[in-house]
Amino acid sequence: MAEAKLNKLNLTEKDYDGAASTMCKGCGHDAISASVQRAYYESSIDPRKVVKLSGIGCSSKTPAYFLSQSFGFNAVHGRMSAVATGANLANHTLLPIGVLQAATFGLAVVAGNWVVPLLERQGTSSAAAGFAGGLVLSIGIVTRPTGGLVAHRVGGRNLVALALIGTCAGAAMLSLDGPFGLAVAGALVLGLAAGLPFAVIFAAAQRARPDAPASAIALVNACGILTVLVGTPLAGLTFELPSDGRLAFAVIAVLSALALLALRAARL
């Protein structure tokens, strides 16, 4: 049996193990845990001088699966960074590593939330309205990862332009007081458009800051989260107007058209 290889601290890679994973088979989190474990081992970082911090959810279970000799703290949702800052101020000799689920579907979430009450106020049943609203988010989830594949064929700028056109068209359809079929078509188009540009934007952010790619991606996600936090209550206010929320979709259509014009002007 081959002898385990030691790093500069005379530790084996086994010394950087964590608890047995309870993630679903094939889950990407296990690959991330293994990579983190290997990186700390190869860098000869003392696991007893590391503090692991996380929030809640699947991603936040990950720290349990590497560096079992390290300190750890599982915070509440969305507060990992605050707790990590406090831990670092309290003991700056420890090396912090934070794990959180830094992803949002931005417009897909906001628009999906809007579609349901919009259709209900137009007389559509709650079940049918829920179907249309869920369509926006579910399609957005599919198009977000596939956007990168499409970008390789049509180009990143063209994909963003296509997404803006789709957003404008879908929002415009939803802003009209038309039949249920038109609303479903609008939700479908809006869902397709909402997820497409993320891969391109993430790649562009990383190219802009090759020295800090993770921070660049976090900034993009922060913008998406801000859209959810700000956009949802603003849309709610439009439901108090005679338009019953259709104004919110009209505004999205106009903003998308303006963004498309700006994108075209930037090329000239």
Image (tube, rainbow, N blue to C red):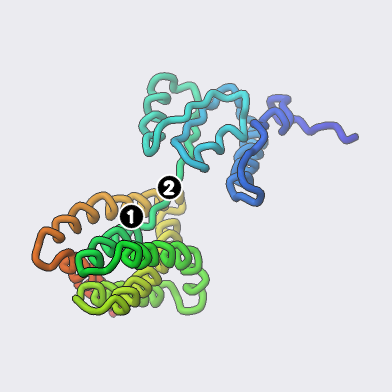
The label number, if any, that marks residue 237 in the structure image: none
Q: Residues within 10 Å of mark 1 (few under 14, many from 20)?
A: some
Say which amino acid is labelled 1: Gly
Residue 139 against residue 36 in the figure, above or below: below
Residue 75: name its quadrant: top left
Q: Is residue 266 visible?
A: no
Q: Secondary structure at mark 1?
A: helix
- Placement of the N terminus among the 4 image quadrants: top right
The tag earlier along the polypeptide, 1 or 2, is 2
* Observer-nearest of 207 and 246: 246
Label 2: how many Cα within 10 Å (few below 14, some 14–19, many 20+): some
- Quarter in which the C terminus is drawn: bottom left
Identify the residue at the far left of this view.
Answer: 242
Residue 79 drawn above or below residue 119: above
Real-space Cα separation, disc 1 to disc 2, in angstroms: 10 Å
Q: Locate residue 220, reporting x and y percent.
A: 36, 54
Q: Residue at x 37, y 68 (%)?
A: 191
Q: Nearer the viewer, residue 75 or 197?
A: 75
Q: Position of residue 32 (x, y in %)?
A: 59, 45
- Residue 197, image x and y in percent? 40, 67
The answer to whether residue 32 is left or right of residue 165 is right
> Would you say 85 lies left or right of 65 here?
left
SS class of the residue under badge 2?
A: loop
Q: At 22% across and 69% down in the image, what residue appears?
A: 123
Up the image or down, 133 lies above or below 189; here it is: above
Residue at 66% x, 39% y: name it.
38
Relative to 17, 58 lies left or right: left
Which residue does the numbered mark 2 point to in the structure image?
A: 102
Residue 225: image x %, image y %?
A: 32, 51
Residue indicated by mark 1: 224
Q: Give the amino acid type for the residue marked by disc 2 in the picture.
A: Ala
Name the residue rendered at 39%, 49% in the picture. Answer: 218
